[in-house]
Image: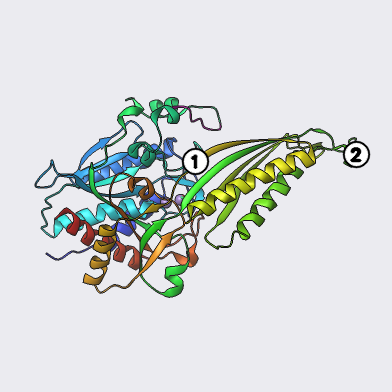
Amino acid sequence: MNLEVDKDRLISEIEELSLISDAEAPAVTRIVFTPTDLRARAWCLARCKKVGLMVRQDAIGNIFARWNGQDPTAAAVATGSHIDAIPNAGKYDGVVGVLAGLEAIRALRQSGFSPKRSIELILFTSEEPTRFGIGCLGSRLLSGNLAAEAAKKLMDKDGASIEEVRHAAGFQRELETVKLPAGHYEAFVELHIEQGPLLEQKQIPLGIVSKIAAPSSFRLFIEGAGGHAGGVLMPDRRDALCAASELILGIEHEAKSSGSTDTVATVGICEVFPGAVNSIPSRVHLSVDIRDTDLHRRDSLISAVDASCQAIAAKRGVNILQELVNADAPGDCAANIVETLSESCKKHGLTFLSMVSRAYHDSLFMSRIAPAGMLFIPCRNGYSHRPDEYASPEDIARGTLVLAETLRSLAG
Ligand code: GLV
Ligand code: MN
Ligand code: MN
């Protein structure tokens, strides 16, 4: 049974989906439950149905497209990723995992393979944190890592709750129905661009992930005192942006001196109020992202930031309020999936690198309820989350072939 991936079809689908975007090409912006995201979902649903897959959607909008196996009652083997994209993103992050998953299923069907276990393609809702502040909304709810009650409290920046937004998008059932039990899936495998430069630098076509770094994020609300930029003399100021600046550089310093290059910290949002050139900033909101492969080191950095907040607040006479969004443990990829992925690479004469994922993925949460693994393909210069993100058709096709081979082994 020869497996043949239709590279041209897959690349033209990636291109077509990238045009459903709120940003001008080549940039892609697709924020969850916007009209654009809903159009992209409809486009994917139509594609899945065309292949003859049985489609269901849950209350948070996760899409499940199933190819029934010979034993439809056996736990399924799943693959998939996300199609939402942060503002001004590229066309490959997430999308490769979804459309290559679909192409892998088509290739398996065309090869005459008849799986014992069902094979399911999953499109997870809102892997990106853009709208509701927390990433992997769909896979967190599905795996029970986010309780429905907690999810209902999430709001977007315009004050719309997740309940309002998902109901308006047509998802009416209770969020409590999203959670799936451990054992529901036999295995989960996600194909993704590396989002880092190692594979390209080492000229190795594939990466097999052993571990996913532990992500965390929190918000800091700094409150000082506003006033006239001319009238308030320097000794009398309690400038919230100056306090925020000291804090941002402190976070950078702490991350750089953690003792490991696996520690990374980013302040990606800084909102200044009132935002006038001649007005002293009275309030600042920062959003901070801290990750590490080592949970203890990641948590030590969070504690160090906490200590900096207290010291800077006392020194500058400002109040700093912290709000934790998430602090997740790292995820280990399952030995049997890593093994199956390596066997699939070997079968096709492809070399691979064993690697850590520094980005988080839906696989992190799937790994809490199923044996999970990830396959990486190179992306040019390691660029991701920017419009010039690029993965070559050859690399995408190789990843798809190994994904198909792996699904074939796992589904039996
Ligand atoms: C996922 O997009 C991440 O930020 O790691
Ligand atoms: Mn991303
Ligand atoms: Mn992604």
Q: Quadrant location of residue 210?
A: bottom left
Give the main secondary structure, helix, strand or loop, of the magenta stretch: loop
Residue positioned 71% across, 44% down in the render = 244
Q: In the rendered view, tell whether residue 12 sits above or below residue 326.
A: below
Can you tell which mark lies on residue 369?
none
Q: Which residue is mark 2?
A: 233
Local crowd size for mark 2, using a 10 Å CA cut-off: few (<14), some (14–19), many (≥20): few
Quarter of the image with the C terminus is: bottom left
Taking depth in this image into account, of 151 and 389 the one nearest to the observer is: 151
- The picture places residue 337, in percent across and down from the top left corner, at 27, 58
Residue positioned 55% across, 62% down in the render = 260
Q: Quadrant location of residue 239?
A: top right
Taking depth in this image into account, of 336 and 279 the one nearest to the observer is: 336
**Amino acid marked by disc 2:** Leu
Q: Nearer the viewer, mark 2 or mark 1?
A: 1
Rounded to the nearest angstrom, the CA distance separating label 2 from label 1 is: 40 Å
The range drawn in magenta is 152-157
Q: In the rendered view, tell whether residue 10 sits above or below residue 158.
A: below
**Helix, strand, or loop for circle 1?**
strand
Q: Is residue 43 left or right of residue 214?
A: left
Q: Which residue is mark 1?
A: 326
**Helix, strand, or loop for circle 2?**
loop
